[in-house]
Amino acid sequence: MGMTITLNGDDTSLAGTLTLSADFAGSLISGDVRGVSDAGEHYYPGTLLISAGAIYRGADTAIDYTFTADMNGTLQAPGGDLAVDGIIDGDFLGASHQAVSGAVLGTVTGAGSIGIIFGDFLAQQ
């Protein structure tokens, strides 16, 4: 998962490992983002939980995402903790739903300021 944090006028590009679990019978999705690091290979310990997710089986994929979930947690950045409060929206890809893609958007609180987090993802089984 690729993300950018904008805080205090500075942009920081991050990458992490996204893991999702889809329960199609219950129309639920959950997971996490771990192993977050920046382009300088600084590791940001912490986990962003993917929770309270829903799968929308009747979504018109031309205009709507087929799943959405909350993405919350704290990352330990070199300059102090970053509290993330966001959402993840995406689509299942392929006849067997073997891949997902989508977007991330939310707020980040850290260093006495509030900023934004945004990004995208593409993952497969």
Image (cartoon, helix red, strand yellow):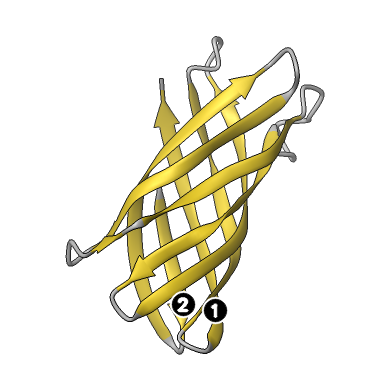
Q: What distance separates the C-alpha of mark 2 from that of mark 1? A: 5 Å
| Residue that mark 2 sits on | 6
Q: Nearer the viewer, residue 57 or 113?
A: 113
Q: Which mark is residue 77?
A: none
**SS class, disc 2:** strand
Q: Residue furthest right?
A: 58
* Residue at (52% x, 89% y) in the render: 112
Q: Residue furthest left?
A: 40
Amino acid type assigned to the residue bearing label 1 in the image: Gly
> Vertical placement of 78 versus 55: above or below?
below
Q: Which mark is residue 115?
A: 1
Amino acid type assigned to the residue bearing label 2 in the image: Thr
Rendered location of residue 55, percent (x, y): 72, 28
> Vertical placement of 110 versus 77: above or below?
below
Q: Earlier in the sequence, mark 2 or mark 1?
A: 2
* Residue at (46% x, 77% y) in the render: 6
